[in-house]
Image: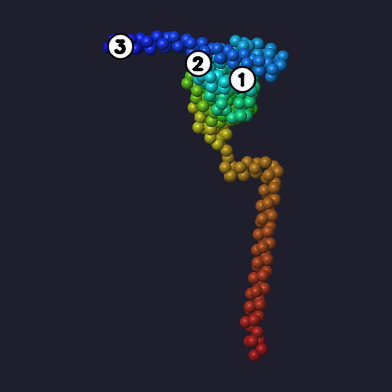
Amino acid sequence: MKICKLVAGICIMALCILTPVRARGQASWAAKMARELVEALVQKGGQQGAKELMELGGETLAREALEKAAQEGGEKLAQRLASLALEHGAALLKVAKESPSKFVSAFDELSPALREAAGQAINREPEVMARLFSNVGKAALTAAAEHPGVGTRVMEVLGREGAETLGRVTTDEAVQLARLAPQIAKVPEPDRQRLMELIARAPGRILDLLETHPKVLATSAALAGFLAAKDQLLGKDEIEIGPDGKPRVARKPGLVGTLTQEFHRPLSGIVGMLGLAMAVWAAIKLWAAYRVSRAKVTGAEKRAASGPTDQK
């Protein structure tokens, strides 16, 4: 029993001694990697690149980000982060600093084109992207890459809901969403979530209605009516928004209704009447031709039948 306790004590002491040594070793080569990375970034970016790097935090930022990467995933993760920073810009270190493993995993999952666009978004707004990635995760990278400039504006106001909706819209619709975002952000839960789901399902139609009728977002009663008409809003019927901000269904006329509407128009009415007159005239001509032809046939039949009697 005493021997077991002795062995356990020795193991604990060894761990206490070796852990700081290992940590110092990681910090040492991470610091060396950071210096080499900074030199490579300066060489690649020149004087402008050096200035931008210093504004981001210089070697201190690089060392802290790479040390954190080493703690989370060892030398392999630190090297991958350094490689991405050298390829796409030092600003990636700013975004990755809080959780390098999470960032590298999310960034590597993007397609090559999106990685390039995400890197550009990060270099444009490193502080904003660092905050958004911390709050939203991978969706922040995707949305910022797919909707340059406008994506970050939407996510800053609408957060994760905005990021998820941005994945379902075109860039023009994202611009509309950015304009409406401050008003949408004021909508209390759970109505805001229901509204964002509605936008995601039919972005063009819903955003157009909201921009055309801002009263919908201004009053809770109007918004309640708008959300209650979800099926009609997503259906094939046309939707009209009344003065009270509530949507009403405008049924499309059928074939009979369409024809009736057309004949109320002067030109359409004249064309219709002319068509009808021509049809009647053609019918009369055909009937007359039929009667003449029938009379000839009947006369010929009668002469053929009476011919032999006259000869006697």
Q: Which residue is mark 3?
A: 3
Marks 1 and 3, how far apart at CA = 52 Å
Give, as a three-letter code, the residue at label 2: Gln
* Element type at mark 2: helix
| Residue carrying label 2 | 71
Q: Earlier in the sequence, mark 2 or mark 1?
A: 2
Judged by depth in the image, the label closer to the viewer, 2 or 1, is: 2
Verify CB contact (< 8 Å) between mark 1 and mark 3.
Answer: no
For mark 1, what is the residue?
85
- Going by the image, does 102 lie left or right of 112? left
Q: Nearer the viewer, mark 3 or mark 2?
A: 3
Taking the spot 30% from the left edge, 11% from the top edge, the residue there is 3
Q: Position of residue 258 (x, y in %)?
A: 61, 42
Q: Is residue 96 visible?
A: yes
Extreme-right residue of the structure: 47
Comparing 21 with 90, the one in front is 21
The quarter in which the N terminus is drawn is top left
The picture places residue 2, in percent across and down from the top left corner, at: 29, 10
